[in-house]
């Protein structure tokens, strides 16, 4: 048997070497994917769980049914702010942790899905190049950089999202592709370039549609990632022992430039942040509580300020004092009054005491109980909408529209409705007057007798609720350098409340947590009131509702 000449001797050896080289180029020499939970998996899980918790929180507060979930609708900016969104007036005045927490928040389901898709596409390569701790550190560092750039560009916008950190991951991978000897295979390079190239136009398209994309955050993330990537790329030319030592030093000092940059932004953007009145936005988003005088600040007086510089000497509950001092500092500076570091440099000293106390009160809730008989059978609906601490208020003032809305949502095909004589609409004149017109608006016709699609009986109930309320009691006065009093204010405000005992059988989901009616903005209202009494006409004008940025 003869053998072909091109498979003999040196020719066969050359073909074999070329084949091996081609296979080596196509086969990845990167380490295999970690068998345990990778950093990317943990980040995907954390972002998804936090979004789910926010969704439940949002639906719970708004008392929405499961079918009306806000999966693909934007969260309210106040909710994002409460969960840790990056917001200059808070981030730059002490709540520094927001530059990290904002990278785990998303505006809606689309925002989450897009970011998690690219986090998975890019992160799985980082999992093979670095340890789990290093990959998590990279996400946090580049996320911090994106938040800092966002604060520098738009300090009064509420920003949230993981795309700044994802752009940081892209920056690291670009640097490694350009400068590292990490032996990426051709397949790895093709896949990485595909993910990176797709990331840019999709984000630009999303920004064009949403009109709220934080391009400054993306720029900060990719610049930080590229810088870290260049430092890490050089380590791939070293031996494994030297590489580990050099990478350890990179991670140890990577946060130092970010701390310096954040300090610079905090100083440069201080005036812009202080020029914005936090309370104006809070009032627009917060329902009226049982302390209307605190949530409705008096108009700003026109006389010149009594003092130009003030020193804060507050005492009391440490947490209350710390939080209130930050709010008061911002309000005073917004009013054109400087806060000094010592009494000797001040024209006046603000002395005061804040303490917390618990009070027991009784609230009243209006319940519209509807008994519905239709072709589907008998059904009971409890509509709980109104809560008040004032005994003679009309608890059913806005309940007619909500009651009709619940009927229409459950009975789409109904056209006629008969109101049973046993209904006690007389318990509320306003409800009795508005209910027929609301039915007509929704396309339902009332019939006095005979067959109807829905037979309805309504009972109006007033439910008494024992509540335990946390109050902040304050006593504040300002004296000048001679000890003469310039201003004095005292009072109390509700901070939070909870039911005493278990939630009642009627509308338990509405009453298990009273956070929707009580809020922690009382201290901000007090700070605003104090600053108004010392307001300077030349102070910067109050800003409008803050913008919002996705990143």
Image (cartoon, rainbow, N blue to C red):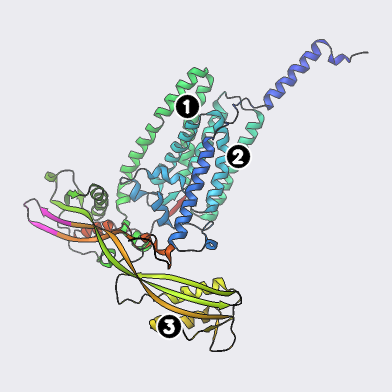
116 in relation to 521, above or below: above
Q: Residue 135 at x, y = what percent?
A: 50, 33
Q: How far apart, in angstroms, are the residues tagged by discs 1 and 3?
A: 74 Å
Q: How far apart, in angstroms, are the residues tagged by discs 2 and 3?
A: 63 Å
Q: Is residue 88 left or right of residue 4?
A: left
Judge whether residue 109 is colored magenta: no
Q: Residue 232 at x, y = what percent?
A: 49, 26
Comes first in the chain, label 2 or label 3:
2
Mark 3 lies on residue: 425
Mark 2 lies on residue: 195
Mark 1 lies on residue: 231
Q: Residue 408 at x, y = what percent?
A: 54, 74
Q: Which residues are magenta?
A: 475-487
Comes first in the chain, label 2 or label 1:
2
33 in relation to 467, above or below: above
Q: Is residue 446 left or right of residue 250?
A: right
Q: How far apart, in angstroms, are the residues tagged by discs 2 and 1?
A: 23 Å
């Amino acid at each position: 048997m003869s053998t072909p000449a091109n498979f003999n001797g040196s020719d066969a050896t050359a073909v074999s070497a070329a084949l091996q080289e081609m296979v080596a180029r196509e086969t990845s020499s990167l380490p295999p994917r970690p068998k345990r939970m990778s950093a990317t998996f943990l980040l995907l899980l954390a972002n998804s769980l936090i979004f789910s918790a926010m969704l439940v929180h949002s639906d719970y507060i708004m008392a929405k049914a499961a079918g009306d979930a806000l999966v693909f609708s934007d969260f309210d900016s106040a909710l994002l702010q409460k969960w840790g969104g990056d917001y200059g007036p808070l981030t730059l005045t002490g709540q520094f942790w927001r530059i990290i927490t904002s990278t785990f928040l998303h505006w809606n389901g689309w925002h989450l899905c897009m970011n998690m898709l690219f986090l998975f596409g890019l992160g799985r390569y980082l999992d093979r190049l670095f340890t789990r701790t290093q990959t998590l550190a990279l996400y946090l560092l580049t996320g911090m950089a994106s938040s800092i750039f966002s604060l520098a560009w738009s300090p009064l916008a509420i920003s949230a999202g993981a795309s700044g950190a994802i752009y940081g991951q892209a920056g690291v991978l670009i640097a490694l592709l350009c400068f590292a000897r990490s032996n990426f295979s051709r397949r790895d390079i093709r896949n990485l370039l595909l993910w990176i190239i797709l990331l840019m136009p999709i984000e630009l398209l999303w920004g064009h549609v949403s009109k709220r994309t934080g391009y400054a955050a993306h720029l900060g993330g990719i610049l930080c990632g590229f810088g870290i990537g260049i430092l890490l790329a050089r380590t791939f030319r070293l031996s494994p022992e030297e590489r580990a030592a050099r990478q350890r030093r990179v991670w140890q000092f990577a946060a130092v430039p970010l701390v310096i940059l954040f300090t610079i932004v905090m100083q440069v953007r201080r005036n812009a942040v202080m020029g914005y009145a936090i309370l104006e936005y809070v009032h627009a988003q917060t329902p009226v509580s049982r302390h209307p005088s605190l949530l409705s600040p008096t108009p700003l007086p026109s006389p010149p300020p009594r003092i130009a510089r003030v020193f804060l000497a507050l005492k009391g509950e440490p947490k209350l004092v710390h939080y209130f001092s930050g709010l008061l500092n911002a309000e005073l500076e917004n009013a054109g009054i400087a806060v000094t570091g010592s009494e000797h440099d001040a024209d006046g000293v603000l002395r005061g005491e804040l303490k917390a106390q618990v009070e027991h009160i009784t609230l009243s809730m209006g319940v519209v109980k509807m008994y519905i008989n239709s072709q589907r059978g008998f059904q009971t609906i409890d509509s709980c909408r109104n809560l008040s601490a004032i005994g003679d208020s009309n608890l059913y003032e806005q309940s007619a529209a909500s009651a009709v809305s619940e009927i229409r949502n459950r009975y789409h095909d109904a056209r006629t409705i008969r109101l049973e004589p046993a209904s006690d609409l007389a318990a509320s004149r306003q409800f009795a007057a508005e209910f027929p017109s609301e039915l007509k608006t929704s396309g339902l016709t009332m019939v006095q007798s005979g067959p109807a699609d829905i037979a309805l009986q309504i009972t109006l109930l007033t439910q008494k609720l024992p509540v335990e309320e946390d109050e902040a009691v304050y006593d504040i006065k300002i004296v000048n350098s001679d000890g003469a009093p310039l201003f004095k204010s005292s009072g109390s405000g509700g901070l939070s409340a909870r039911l005493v005992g278990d939630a009642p059988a009627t509308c338990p989901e509405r009453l298990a947590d009273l956070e929707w009616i009580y809020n922690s903005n009382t201290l901000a209202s007090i700070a605003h009131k104090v600053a108004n009494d010392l307001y300077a006409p030349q102070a910067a004008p109050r800003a409008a509702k803050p913008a919002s940025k996705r990143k």
